[in-house]
Amino acid sequence: MALLQISEPGESPEPHTRRLAVGIDLGTTNSLVATIRNAVPECLPDEAGRTMLPSAVRYAEQGIVDVGHLALAHRGDDALNTITSVKRFMGRSIADVREETKARYQFTTPSGDGKGQLKITTRRGAISPIEVSAEILKTLKARAEESLGGELYGAVITVPAYFDDAQRQATKDAAQLAGLHVLRLLNEPTAAAVAYGLDQKAEGTYLIYDLGGGTFDVSILRLTRGVFEVLATAGDTHLGGDDFDEALAKHAFETWQLARALSPAGQANLLAASRAAKEALSDNETATIKVNWGCGFDSSVDVSRERFYELTRPLVDRTISAVKKTLRDAKLKVGDIDGVVLVGGATRTPQVRAALEAHFGKPALATMNPDEVVALGAAIQADQLAGNAKQGEQHLLLDVIPLSLGIETMGNLVEKIVSRNSTIPIAKAQEFTTFKDGQTAMAVHVVQGERELVSDCRSLARFELRGIPPMVAGAARIRVTFQVDADGLLSVSATEVTSGARAEVAVKPSYGLADGEIATMLQVAYTHASADMQARALAEARVDASALVQALGIALDEDRALLSESEAVALTSQVAFLKQLAEGTDHRAIARATEDLNRASTDFAGRRMDKAVNKALAGKNIASIA
Amino acid sequence: MSYFEAFELTPSFALDLKTLATRYRDLQTETHPDRFVSASDAEKRAAMEKATEVNDAYQTLRDPVRRAMYLLWLKNVNGMDEKNTSMPHDFLVEQIEWREAIADAKLKEDTDRLDEMNTELQAILRSLGNIFSVTYEGGHLSTATTLARKMRFVQRLIEEVDHAIAALD
């Protein structure tokens, strides 16, 4: 009898149909998109041959939106409508914006109380940073689809390892708004480690030092036979190359002793001149910051490399403190690190390299382009998640949650539920009880951070648990489960233990979008026509249905033996039913049937998982006996 | 299924951490959600739950104090019970002395002394673990419980030293 060929779960059944998948580095100053072509990861260029897309979006006249170089060109003359470094505003409130940035834009909040996700007032009205990021992602998506000649199956989008839940959620929302299927949010230093590790076939313990345009991350990873295990991570989501520019700009401004504060346009010009001077100082001993204010008036100042080092020493010191913290968290000494890898354009500054060399006693590795390495790593991961990687060439990433999760208890105190540097996915359950007789609801406040006081941590969400069966005070036992998934995102569920009743969890995110908001934004984006909305809903329902039909088809081929005859028949007929339904046009019915089939196959999924576990352990026992 | 069974290991304190780490990686290779990105939602959920369980088991077994507490729990002993706080008097005195020493070194910003204390405490934790192992295997659960509780105290001291070092950096 011929042996049946069976593919890995998640792998495409037909070996020749590669799914188009990309990695996107959504950076503070520049963004990139990369993919695997002919087994090699490469960044995709625009029509002018440039791989880097400046992360700049301009809301121009007549509803035109410019992205990238085109937008950046107007940073000086249309500053208020040209948004740069939008990554710094993702999942952030006005209170989080630094003083020197506050003058650059007109910030606002929907509620007007300054709380929650900030928005930026432009000639197109108040725009959320999520919408701005979505414009950048849309541009990269279009570039990739044109270059690859087809619709994308999905994308891996990188985020700073130190991004909190609100910032991650905002990034995922932006991708959804751009019409991208997010395969995974991947931490930037981990992405870089993948690109390096697989390229150099490295084994050992590595420290990734990632200083980008606006964010800083440091991660320590252990590489063992294709497994990338993050041991610890630390960082600062508000520290990067931009701050080096600002240090120079501040110095120039103070030297010139100008009579009045700079206009947004003047500030943009000064920052651009400072950045040019910084770049020149990587190769020259001195550079000049020169700004033409218009009307024949200009200012200039010479800066030596030494002066530049002095001005930026506090910034470099902050990164070295984070390096020390990561080593401590990983319980490692300097000598345990086999190599230090440089990532991010700002690691080109010589003082950064010198400081790291002094700390580790050996030069850092920078054999790959520090601007591209994150996107390349993301592309490798996207390729594998899409099921394109060959068996045996697969690797595994085990990442961690960067900041502890906790809940508010009496007296403004935080009770830690999940501690930082725990490997994800992770879940922790906590039991609560009622305070009053007959109480049927309770409020839980979830925060993220390391400090002991609620007010010093970041508020993530407030949950209201409703539908608790009425009992005497202290009798109800409500078990709340906090689940952090592989994207590092939190979800919460609750059950009343004694009655088994499932309490409803109503989420009120402190920063992210409320449930309906994305839908509203999509609606606006789709030219108000309800026909378009219908078409989109139908297309989405069909994609979901066909993905499920395909996935279950593979599962049934592989593991029919795990089902009884009647179970197998029931599932098969339900799959056939959904397949037929998906040819119709009732998107609600398709969505409902998809959900039903998902529910019906839960048991089967569990049995398949047990089989996978047995497979993982089986081979090893033989090995350990031998 | 106990955490030990999940890794196909015999329940014991003297665990081969290398084997544990290898089996952990093998299990994650098969159950991690990254392996199920294009699977059905039901399988995605099952993978997340399984990978979560494997992570939890690994974190418990690789930490000496949590491993000791877990072994006791398998014998229906709750070593973490806050109501049972009686500890030997001389041990408590030692604890106070350690805390004073840490506070003193912190005040003097003596990082070297703190590093030394860290090394000493790690050694104490290891030797307590060794005694726990023998006592537990011998079925002396009440003595083993006291030892596990001592280990938890020592681990907290180590954390305090780490915090002090971090604050001085």
Image (cartoon, coloured by chain):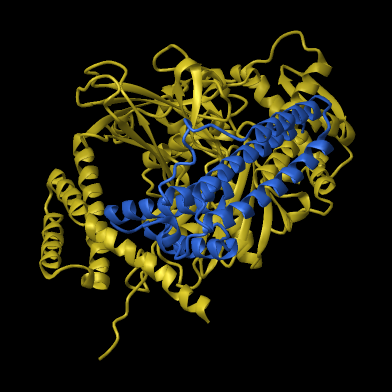
Q: Residue reaching furthest bottom?
A: A1
Chain that is coloured blue in the picture: B
Is B96 situated above or below A148?
above
**Percent position of residue B5, x then y:** 42, 61
Viewer-nearest residue: A318 or A366: A318
Q: Image point 40% across, 37% down: which residue?
A: A173
**Toward which corner of the image does residue A226 lie, by quadrant?**
bottom right
Quadrant location of the N terminus of chain A? bottom left
Q: Image point 42% across, 51% down: which residue?
A: B75
**Percent position of residue B108, x then y:** 84, 26
Q: How many marks?
A: 0
Q: Is residue A401 left or right of residue B45?
A: right
Q: Colour of chain A?
A: yellow
Q: Is residue B146 left or right of residue A247?
A: left
Task: Determine if residue A335 is in view.
Answer: yes
**Percent position of residue A94, x then y:** 52, 19
Q: Residue reaching furthest top?
A: A259
Viewer-nearest residue: A314 or B97: B97
Task: Determine if residue A215 is in view.
Answer: no
Q: Image point 42% across, 64% down: which residue?
A: B30
**Percent position of residue A625, x then y:** 50, 79
